[in-house]
Amino acid sequence: MKKQPSHDACISKCATNDYIDQIKEHLPSDQLLLELANFFKVFGEHTRIRILSALYQRELCVCDLVEILEMNQSAISHQLRVLRTSKIVRYRKEGKNVYYTLDDEHVYKLLDDGLEHIKENSP
Amino acid sequence: MKKQPSHDACISKCATNDYIDQIKEHLPSDQLLLELANFFKVFGEHTRIRILSALYQRELCVCDLVEILEMNQSAISHQLRVLRTSKIVRYRKEGKNVYYTLDDEHVYKLLDDGLEHIKENSP
DNA sequence: TATATATATGAATGTATATTCATATGTTCA
DNA sequence: TGAACATATGAATATACATTCATATATATA
């Protein structure tokens, strides 16, 4: 029977426990955590979050986004590519235009949760 | 009565609508969106997400994290500072040790949502 | 077919930031 | 008080990446 680690001590220094190993074992794989980090990273950039925030309201084409965000078309397209690649937005072509939307409910939910957290922690 | 924009055209080029302006008006402030981006950015880094993933399981002190993640203590501390500053983790001191935990339910929820999205989109 | 429009993308550049190294701070205990 | 330990932090460096510029691709229309 393993000794329970005391919360009063640095458990890694308790010679007779293997909690460190247990925590290690229960960690998701590094591969998965890397994907998760990359997923969040996409939300973690000012221009991209502005794009997502606009698409939250409605499907929009690239030139709409250019006007709404008052930014270079090239910059918008580059960021849209990042969003596409990470499956955070979907798009459909229609004539010369390409219309973007948020990919699924997860994306809406994450934006909601994030905003909620911000608002609670802002004075 | 304003004309409804056609979904078939780039609405910004429809001279008789102000949808672009309406979307602009309904955007959260740039200040708020910047905070939101910075919040997500903190989750969007491999080392930090590994730290959060370990803390998801249990309160841990710095030296535990050093062992679990097999990383430089300095690197861990630097990243813990980022996590502290963004109110994503809390800490308590106890003797020489400093114990960290995830700050609130939002953090658990975001990690859950993110993982769920990843798992759905991974083949 | 030639031109205009919408979008995408490669290369270059500047900025942000993660890690490392060295060292400082703070705590315990002999 | 001094030595050992846990943690934090400033500076330097290397890497990642957002934006811009120039240009390519694709579609519509005259």
Image (tube, coloured by chain):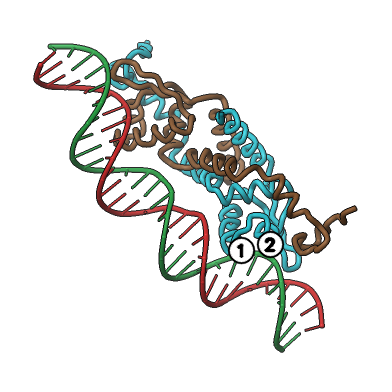
Chain colours: A brown, B cyan, C red, D green
| Vertical arrangement, residue B28 with respect to residue B34, above or below | above
| Left or right: residue D5 compared with residue A74 | right
| Vertical arrangement, residue A65 with respect to residue C16, above or below | above
Q: Chain of mark 1?
A: B
Residue D3 screen position, x and y as percent = 71, 83
Residue A10 screen position, x and y as percent = 76, 62
Using the numbered discs, state the Cα–Cα distance from disc 2 to disc 1 in whole angstroms: 7 Å
| Residue holding disc 2 | B63
| Left or right: residue B95 compared with residue A4 | left
| Foreground residue among C12 and A25 | A25
Report the residue at 67% width, 57% height from top. Answer: B65
Count of all numbered marks drawn on residues in the image: 2
| Residue holding disc 1 | B73
Mark positioned earlier in the residue sequence (2 or 1): 2
Asked if the residue at tag 1 contacts the one at tag 2, i.e. Cβ–Cβ closer than 8 Å, the answer is: yes
Q: Mark 1, residues whose alpha carbon is within 10 Å: few (<14), some, or many (≥20)?
A: some
Amino acid at circle 1: Gln
